[in-house]
Image: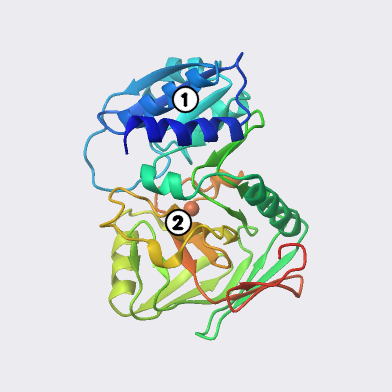
Amino acid sequence: MDLGSFTEICVHQLRMSGVQSDEQLVVLTQGDDRLDYANAFMAASRVLGASMVHLRLPAPPPTGVWAVGQTALASMPEVVESLKAFDMLIDCVFLLFSPEQMAIQAAGTRILTVVEPPELLARMPPSIELREKVEAAAAILSSAKVMHVTSRHGTDVVYQLNAYPTISEYACTDEPGRWDHWPSGFVFTGASDDGVDGTIVVAPGDVLLPQNTYVRSPVTYKIDRGLVTDISGGLESDLINSYMASFNDERGRAMSHIGWGMNPDAKWHAMSPGLFPGGMGMEPRSFIGNVLFSTGPNNELGGSNDTACHLDIPLRACSLLLDDEPVILDGRIVHRDLI
Ligand code: FE
């Protein structure tokens, strides 16, 4: 995307994130990645009269593995300290799940993750409508005690809630210390650590992230007291088992966040590695009416599991009930507060 167009959508983003002319902002990149993002955000902040600096970290060693929570900042405590002084951090690296991100947020700096391709940022801009819908969903989720998810493919799983806070993602952030991710549009929380039981069937067309693939044949997860005890099925179950085993970390078998998508701009069918090389799947995470379940860490929610083994799996056409009240039926949002 040319700098002018990229700058334009970044101006919209910074306005939606409440950036004021007296604020100090920083944009973080690493290696040769996303230098054009830094240029666009610097130009955008100039339009709004705010000051922004660009901090560029050295390139990480090439591992080929998406190990969440491990960043170059871990060995640079003095840099983490300096980042705490800013009003807002634009994170073009992906600090999520890292202790460094948590420390920066705790100091009051708001953080926006921006790593998806510019074309997708343009197609899924933040809006007041999206924020209102997501906040309404968060209000419903945060007051629920039990979540029951079913599907005609055989999913039947119960999450005991109220152990962890509810997190909303609506693609911008204007509150001190709050984190968000552009693009997004969903809500999630976590069950108590031993509070998930049942079966999840990942059906054809559901999405494996970070593999960025659609599932072709069903994959059946058996879950007992918050731990995945078995994953079986065809090729994709082998992929999942092999990927998880490569971390050599049993904590990867824990259940992580659970929630649902609220963004009508996100299309289930649009995930295309060819079209958006380098994308990390925020579109399938966000499409309206999905149920997004995940395995691995829960430190993002305040839990103690900080394993680097993390899968996010958006499911289609599920029904989701909170305390027996339907929120989603067969992939359609039906709750009166969300329509
Ligand atoms: Fe996740």
Q: Quadrant of the C terminus?
A: bottom right
Work out whether residue 158 or residue 114 is closer to the camera in this orientation and state it.
Answer: 114
The image's mark for residue 283 is 2
Q: Residue at x 49, y 43 (%)?
A: 182
Q: Residue at x 49, y 15 (%)?
A: 82
Q: Quadrant of the N terminus?
A: top left
Mark-to-mark CA distance, 1 and 2: 24 Å
**Marks 1 and 2: CB-CB under 8 Å?**
no
Q: Residue at x 75, y 54 (%)?
A: 139
Residue of label 1 = 44
For label 1, the SS is helix
- Name the kind of residue labelled 1 in the image: Ala
Question: In the image, residue 97 lies at what x, y percent?
Answer: 48, 41
Work out whether residue 166 or residue 12 is closer to the camera in this orientation and state it.
Answer: 12
The image's mark for residue 142 is none
Direction front: furthest residue: 4
- Name the kind of residue labelled 2 in the image: Glu
